[in-house]
């Protein structure tokens, strides 16, 4: 039984049918683990209902991130600026903390891999750099929970760290794809320029949008309604 196979010309790998099934099971398992964590030590009926609200909010955020990742603007050098897809994942970590934030980000990394990477990858470590490490890094926003301007700084750091993993993967696997017109004198910085061009562009646009007064008001309402202060289950999980 094989999860991946080498294509005929030997230049890259693809997932087999078994590999797709295994990846889907892993995704379901990640979501199930998140459900167990937010439900841990909860027995009272009202708390179970609150847990359901958390899981529903997490599921909606992952779905929004996945859908908006298809709404994108392709940059001339490559890479794409999406419709705030990174923000939805970072926001979960900011709201619910490290455990839920990283599990949500990891689940999203599996979706991102199934979306684009499963049909073309070079090595397992390349997959980790471009997908599993990079998108799971969005959970880093959780470290800024309850801090002043925590959402802003958590989102910025998460985007930068995601770009770092892409850059590492670029140096290791993708330098041969550098376009001919790119200055040879700047070869050493091609990978960070390529990867941060679209990540920072999306980050800046997102920061501008979430800084608008109506958006800030809406996010404050969501935090007050669905944040950990209104979910006893999350309080006990963090204790």
Image (cartoon, rainbow, N blue to C red):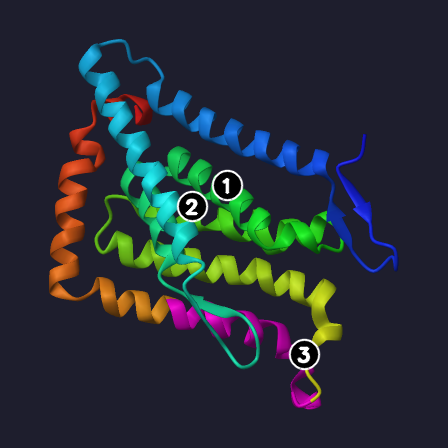
Marked residue nearer the N-terminal end (1 or 3): 1
Measured from the top left, where is residue 144 in percent x and y? 31, 48
In the rendered image, which quarter is residue 45 located in?
top left
In the rendered image, which quarter is residue 104 located in?
top left
Q: Which of the two discs, 2 and 3, sits closer to the camera?
A: 2
Q: Main secondary structure of the magenta part?
A: helix
Label 3 CA crowd tier, 10 Å (few <14, some 14–19, many 20+) = few
Res 117 visible: yes
Residue at x-position 53% and y-position 50%: 112
Q: Which of the two discs, 1 and 3, sits closer to the camera?
A: 1
Q: Quadrant of the C terminus?
A: top left
Was residue 192 drawn as part of the magenta stretch in this picture?
yes
The residue range painted magenta reads 181-202
Res 97 visible: no
Q: Does 218 appear above or below 54?
A: below
Label 2 CA crowd tier, 10 Å (few <14, some 14–19, many 20+) = many
The answer to the question of whether label 1 and label 3 lie on touching residues, with beta carbons closer than 8 A, is: no
The answer to the question of whether label 1 and label 2 lie on touching residues, with beta carbons closer than 8 A, is: yes
Q: Is residue 66 left or right of residue 218?
A: right
Q: Nearer the viewer, residue 201 or 188?
A: 201
Q: Nearer the viewer, residue 31 or 74?
A: 74
Q: Nearer the viewer, residue 93 or 69?
A: 69
Marked residue nearer the N-terminal end (1 or 2): 1
Measured from the top left, where is residue 202 in percent x and y? 39, 68
Estimate the spatial distance between the alpha carbons at disc 1 and disc 2, rounded to whole Å.
8 Å
Was residue 76 drawn as part of the magenta stretch in this picture?
no
Q: To which residue does mark 1 refer?
A: 106
Q: To which residue does mark 3 refer?
A: 188
Q: To which residue does mark 2 refer?
A: 139
Q: Quadrant of the N terminus?
A: top right
**Label 3 secondary element:** helix
């Amino acid at each position: 039984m094989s999860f991946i196979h080498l294509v005929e010309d030997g230049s890259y790998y693809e997932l087999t049918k078994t590999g797709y099934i295994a990846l889907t099971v892993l995704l379901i398992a990640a979501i199930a683990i998140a459900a167990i964590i937010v439900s841990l030590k909860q027995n009272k009926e009202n708390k179970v209902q609150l847990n359901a609200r958390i899981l529903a909010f997490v599921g909606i955020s992952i779905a929004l991130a996945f859908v908006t990742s298809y709404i994108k603007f392709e940059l001339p050098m490559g890479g794409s600026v999406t419709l705030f897809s990174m923000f939805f994942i970072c926001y979960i970590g900011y709201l619910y903390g490290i455990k839920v934030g990283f599990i949500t980000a990891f689940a999203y990394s599996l979706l991102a891999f199934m979306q684009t990477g499963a049909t073309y990858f070079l090595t397992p470590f390349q997959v980790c750099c471009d997908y599993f490490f990079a998108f799971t890094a969005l959970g880093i926003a959780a470290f800024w929970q309850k801090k002043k301007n925590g959402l802003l700084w958590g989102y910025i750091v998460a985007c930068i760290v995601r770009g770092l993993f892409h850059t590492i993967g670029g140096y290791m696997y993708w330098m041969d794809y550098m376009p001919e017109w790119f200055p040879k004198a700047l070869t050493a910085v091609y990978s960070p320029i390529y990867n941060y061009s679209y990540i920072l562009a999306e980050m800046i646009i997102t920061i501008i949008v979430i800084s608008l007064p109506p958006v800030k008001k809406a996010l404050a309402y969501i935090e007050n309604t669905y944040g950990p202060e209104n979910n006893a289950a999350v309080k006990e999980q963090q204790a």
